[in-house]
Image (tube, grey):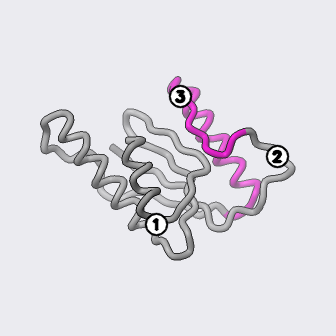
Amino acid sequence: MLITVQDAKGKFRFRFANFCIMPTHMHLLIEPDERTNLSMIMRLIKTQSAKRWNSIHGSKDHMWGAGYYERAVKNPHEFEFVMDYIDQTRQRWDLPQFRQTGKRHRTTIPVPDPYYLVVCNI
């Protein structure tokens, strides 16, 4: 999955602030470039990760549920809440840390423009 995310970053312009891949779904906090459509990014991530999974496991099954949920993050407080939520989810599932932004300082978080919380079901 991480290889697919890296490939998507090479093809489209966007940043991950934080993400967590779990056995049943994943959470992404993503900022698309103004020239990049969020649905294009998600289509590539979902398609390529499913192809890789099927190739590795000799399968032809569907991997992802239909569609995905997205919600715009509107202000620094909400951005911080989503960052913490993803971190806490990762801790509850005992998963490794993937945060891209390093150590955060609550008083210096800029207004996110435009970040989206994206949830995809497997």
First in sequence: mark 2 or mark 3?
A: 3
Task: Say if 96 sits above or below 86 in the image.
Answer: above
Which residue is pictured at 25% across the width and 40% down the height?
53
Residue 8 location (% of width, % of height):
41, 56
Which residue is pictured at 44% across the width and 49% down the height?
6
Residue 119 location (% of width, % of height):
46, 51
Residue 67 falls left or right of residue 71: left
The answer to the question of whether label 2 and label 1 lie on touching residues, with beta carbons closer than 8 A, is no
Residue 12 falls left or right of residue 54: right
Distance, label 2 to label 3, CA atoms, is: 22 Å
Which quarter of the image is occupied by the C terminus?
top left
Q: Which residue is mark 3?
A: 96
Q: Which residue is mark 1?
A: 38
Q: Secondary structure at mark 3?
A: loop
Q: Is residue 95 magenta?
A: yes
Q: Which residues are magenta?
A: 74-102
Q: Which residue is mark 2?
A: 106
Residue 60 location (% of width, % of height):
13, 44
First in sequence: mark 1 or mark 3?
A: 1
Amino acid type at mark 1: Leu
